[in-house]
Amino acid sequence: MEAILEMKSITKEFPGVLANDNVNLDLKKGEVHALVGENGAGKSTLMSVLFGIYQPTKGKIFYKGEELKIDGPNDAIDLGIGMVHQHFMLVHTLTVAENIILGSEPSDKGRLKLSNAIDKIKSLSDEYGLNVNPNAKIKDIPVGMQQRVEILKALYRDAEVLILDEPTAVLTPQEVKGLYKIMDTLTEQGKSIIFITHKLKEVLTVSDRITVLRKGKSIGTVNTTDTSETQLAEMMVGRKVILKVEKKPANFGSIKVEVKDLKVSNTRGMLALDNVSFDIREGEILGVAGVEGNGQTELVEVLTGLRKADSGLFKLEGQKLLNQSARKIKEAKVAHVPEDRHKHGLVLDYSIEDNLILGYHYKKPFAKGINLDFNSMAEHAERLIPDYDIRPRNKEILARSLSGGNQQKIIIAREFDMGPEFLIASQPTRGVDIGAIEFIHKRIVEQRDQGKAVLLVSAELSEIMSLSDRIAVMYEGRIVDILDASEATEEKLGLLMAGSTVKSEE
C-alpha cells in the first residue's frame, strides 16, 4: 500500500543538541504506525516537526505525494493532520462543544452559532463510537472522556492523520481498551494514526508497524507481527534488557508501618484523603494503584512531612511521626523518592557529589561542626557513582546536564544508601529509559529483601503488578480495596480504579 505521508531525512538541531538525525518515517492509509524509543530519543521532536511546532533543520515532508512546508500547527490542521497531546489542551469551565470549536467558531452575523457545530459533533461522535455529550462541561467528565474530546477536536477539523502522544498515560485499563476500539474504528474509516508510546505491550497490541528511534536516529521499521517486546527493547536500548522483574517469594516480618484514619485537605481546603488506613510489614512492598489525582500525591506528602494532616496516625516501628518535620521523619529512617525529581529530589545546579548528600549534609560524616567535610563527600560520591551506575562518572558534573535516568539514579543512590527502614518510592521510573527502569526495579526489590517496608506509588499498572506483594487501590481519596498481588488482574484493578467497586465499611 502506498504511503499517505512521508518524512524523509528529517534533521532537527537545537543549540548543542542533535534531536533528530536523518530520520525517515512513512505512514500508510488506514494503519496505526507506532513510534517508540527511550526518553530523549527524538519522538516528540519528530512529531513537533510534522505538526509545525518546529521547523526542520533539513529534510522533507510529503503528504499525498506533494512536498509540504508546514509553518505552524494551523497549516498542519488545514492539511488534515491533527495531534492529541499527552497533556490535554482543554478549558475545563467550557463545554465539550465550546472546546471543540475554539479557534474556528461558527458565527451568524457576528454571533456565535453553536447548533450546527453540536449537530456535527454528535454525528462524528456516533460515527466513531466516541459517545461524547457535546453539552457536558469538561470539568464534569472523566479523563478518558476528555481524551475523546481531543480526538473529536481533530476529527471536527477533518483530520486524515492523527498523532496520539502517549495517549494511555492517564487512563484506566478499561479506558485503554475503549481507546483501542476507537482507534480500530478510525482506521476502518480510512484514518491513519501515529501512536507515540514507551509501553511495548501496547505497541504490540495496537499497531501495524513500528519505527524505533534511538539517540535521534531511526534504528529501523518492523512489522508488528514479526517482532517481540524483547527485540523492540534491544532496538531501543542497544543491548539485551531483562523486562521481567526477578524477585524471590516475600519473607514477611512483623508490622513496620501503620497508617490509620488519615484525613488530609488539599491546597483548596477540600478533603484529599478520607480515612486512609493500611499497614506494611517488614520485607513487603505495598503498591498504590489509581488514576493520578486521587490522593496519591497528598498521601506521600503527608508521610514525608511535606504536608500536614488534619487527623489520623502514622507510626514507624512504634514511633509516631504524623505532622513531624520532613527532617525529623528523614531522621527516623524514612527515605523518599519523590514523584517530581526536579522539584523535590535534586538541586539541578549542584554537582552529582552535592546532590548525593542532600538532606543528610548536616550530619556526620559529611559535616564537621558547621563546615562540610569535602573528603567524606568525595569518598561517598566515588563509592556510589559506580555502585548505582550513574553516568558520566565525574562527580563534579552538574545534575542539570544528566539524562532523566541518571538524575533518578542519584536520588535512588542517596536515599537507598542511607539505610532506610521505610522506603517511599513515588513514580520511581517516570521519564526513565528501559535500561534504568530495569536497574531501579532491582534495587527496590533488594530493599524489600533486606526486610525494609516499601510503599510504591506508580501510575504504571504493570510496575505496580510486577513489584508489589499487596496492592492498595485509591479512588477519590479513599482506599477502596487492598488485595494480594497474586489475586490482582488488570480488569479487577481497573474497575476499582474507576470506583465501580467500593470496599464495604467495617
Image (cartoon, helix red, strand yellow):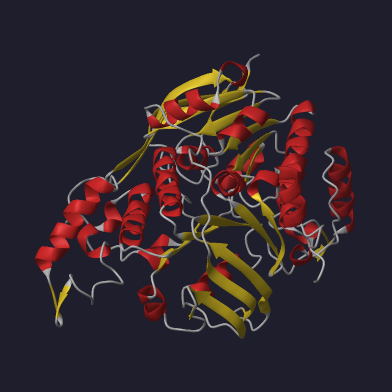
Task: Determine whether 102 is above or below 261 in the image.
Answer: above
Looking at the rendering, in which quadrant would you find the N terminus?
Answer: top right
Dividing the picture into quadrants, the one containing residue 191 is: top right
Dividing the picture into quadrants, the one containing residue 335 is: bottom left
In the drawing, does residue 23 fall left or right of residue 221? Answer: left
Dividing the picture into quadrants, the one containing residue 341 is: bottom left
Q: Residue at x 40, y 38 (%)?
A: 435
Q: Residue at x 42, y 83 (%)?
A: 325
In the drawing, does residue 486 fall left or right of residue 234? Answer: right
Task: Determine whether 85 is above or below 245 in the image.
Answer: below
Q: Residue at x 64, y 23 (%)?
A: 208
Q: Residue at x 60, y 40 (%)?
A: 76
Outermost residue toward the left in this view: 375
Can you give x and y, in whole percent of width and height, for residue 117 in the image?
Answer: 84, 53
Can you give x and y, in whole percent of width and height, for residue 345 in the image?
Answer: 38, 64
Can you give x and y, in whole percent of width and height, for residue 137 in the image?
Answer: 79, 65
